């Protein structure tokens, strides 16, 4: 049985070559990516929600859920530098190998920062009785925290 020219890979049909090369590149790119998942906790093992976990090169970013879990998907294989940060805790950075086509696991434990490292905050309000009437007249009390 003879093949028709449009179904063969030959130099006479460059469109066919381009299609095959494009599919090959797509498949190779997918194979050369991996996921990194894990849990972020404090030093006592309590999960930390809302921590930012990201590849330092900016390719991927995730925020931990209420159980401290995160997952960075489709990272390029090789090695990636991960950064984990949460307000009130010291940032951690660590290199992480990303095996080709395999899911890697990386847990992080963050140390609490010093009070002096926290941003300055203040509370403003009126002290009132149970009926909502201000105590001691209409005076604002301001308290500087930290």
Image: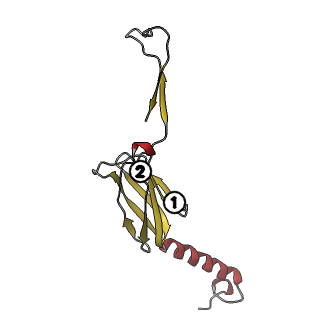
Identify the image quadrant of the C terminus: top left
Q: Which mark is residue 60?
A: 1
Q: Does residue 22 appear left or right of residue 87 in this picture?
A: right
Q: Does residue 19 appear left or right of residue 94 in this picture?
A: right
- In which quarter of the view is residue 92 placed? bottom left
Residue 119: where, in percent of width, then height? 49, 41
Q: Does residue 86 appear left or right of residue 18 in this picture?
A: left
Residue 130: where, in percent of width, then height? 37, 10
What is the secondary structure assignment of the residue under circle 1?
A: loop
Q: Which residue is mark 2?
A: 64
In the image, what residue occupies the spot 66% across and 79% down? Answer: 18
| In-front residue for pair 24/74 | 74
Q: Which mark is residue 144?
A: none
| In-front residue for pair 52/7 | 52
Q: Residues within 10 Å of mark 1 (few under 14, many from 20)?
A: some
Identify the image quadrant of the N terminus: bottom right
Q: Residues within 10 Å of mark 2 (few under 14, many from 20)?
A: many
């Amino acid at each position: 049985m003879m093949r028709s020219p449009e179904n063969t890979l030959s130099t006479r049909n460059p469109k066919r070559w381009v299609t095959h090369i494009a599919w090959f590149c797509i498949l190779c790119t997918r194979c050369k990516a991996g996921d990194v998942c894990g849990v972020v906790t404090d030093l006592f093992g309590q999960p930390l929600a809302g921590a930012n976990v990201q590849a330092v090169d900016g390719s991927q970013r995730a925020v931990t859920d209420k159980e401290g879990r995160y997952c960075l998907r489709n990272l390029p294989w090789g090695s990636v530098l991960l950064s984990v940060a949460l307000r009130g805790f010291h940032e951690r950075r660590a290199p992480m190998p990303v095996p080709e086509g395999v899911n890697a696991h990386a847990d992080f434990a963050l140390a609490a920062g010093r009070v002096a490292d926290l941003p300055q905050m203040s509370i403003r309000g009126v002290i009132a009785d149970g009926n909502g009437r201000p105590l001691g007249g209409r005076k604002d009390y301001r308290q500087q925290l930290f």
